[in-house]
Amino acid sequence: MDNKIKKKIIHEISRLDKYILEAKPLLDLCQTKGPSFIELSALASVLHSFYNGFESISLLFIKYLGKNKPDDIKWHKSLLDIMFGDNSFNISLIRQEIKQKIDNYRQFRHIIRFSYSFEYDWDEMKNLVINLEEI
């Protein structure tokens, strides 16, 4: 792998790790009780940032493969598919068993972009929050 891209990927992973570490008190709090409106809004931001970090890392891998970012209307989904083996090398860059879990974060990203925070539903977010550190 190109050393420059490798360094960028490692840097993105470290940023993501730091972000999750900083959010850990909020993540832990929500393990025991439902979040308030403000906590729910903050959690949505955490989930959104997490998926953005995943996409940044994915785009670096795509660059490594010598490909361009998908340019179709559903490029976020196309990018995810590429990461899980739908590429000219037929290489799955991430374990298949977490594809649906990652896709759930992608779908939630859409909710964040097109909803007001008072419309967030803890029941829909709960598994994403609880599983964030594992993913």
Image: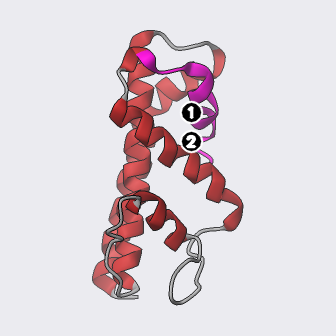
Of helix, strand and loop, which mostly describes the magenta segment? helix
Q: Position of residue 79 (x, y in %)?
A: 44, 66
Residue receiving disc 2: 132
Residue receiving disc 1: 129
Q: Looking at the picture, tell me which residue is in the foreground, 16 or 35.
A: 35
Q: Position of residue 122 (x, y in %)?
A: 56, 20
Horizontally, residue 26 falls left or right of residue 71, namely right
Q: Which mark is residue 44?
A: none
Q: What separation in Å lies between label 2 and label 1 (alpha carbons)? A: 5 Å
- Mark 1 neighbour density, 10 Å: few (under 14) some (14–19) many (20 or more): many
Find the residue positioned furthest to the top. Answer: 36
For the question of whether residue 30 can be seen, the reply is: yes
Q: The residue under label 2 is which amino acid type?
A: Leu
Residue range highlighted in magenta: 119-135
Locate residue 14: give its quadrant.
bottom left
Let me know if residue 38 is in the magenta part.
no
Q: The residue under label 1 is which amino acid type?
A: Val
Which quadrant is the N terminus positioned in?
A: bottom left
Q: Position of residue 104 (x, y in %)?
A: 57, 45
Find the residue positioned furthest to the front. Answer: 73
For the question of whether residue 21 can be seen, the reply is: no
For numbered disc 2, what is the local secondary structure? loop
Q: Is residue 18 above or below residue 121?
A: below
For numbered disc 1, what is the local secondary structure? helix
Q: Residue at x 41, y 76 (%)?
A: 61
Locate residue 48: give its quadrant.
top left
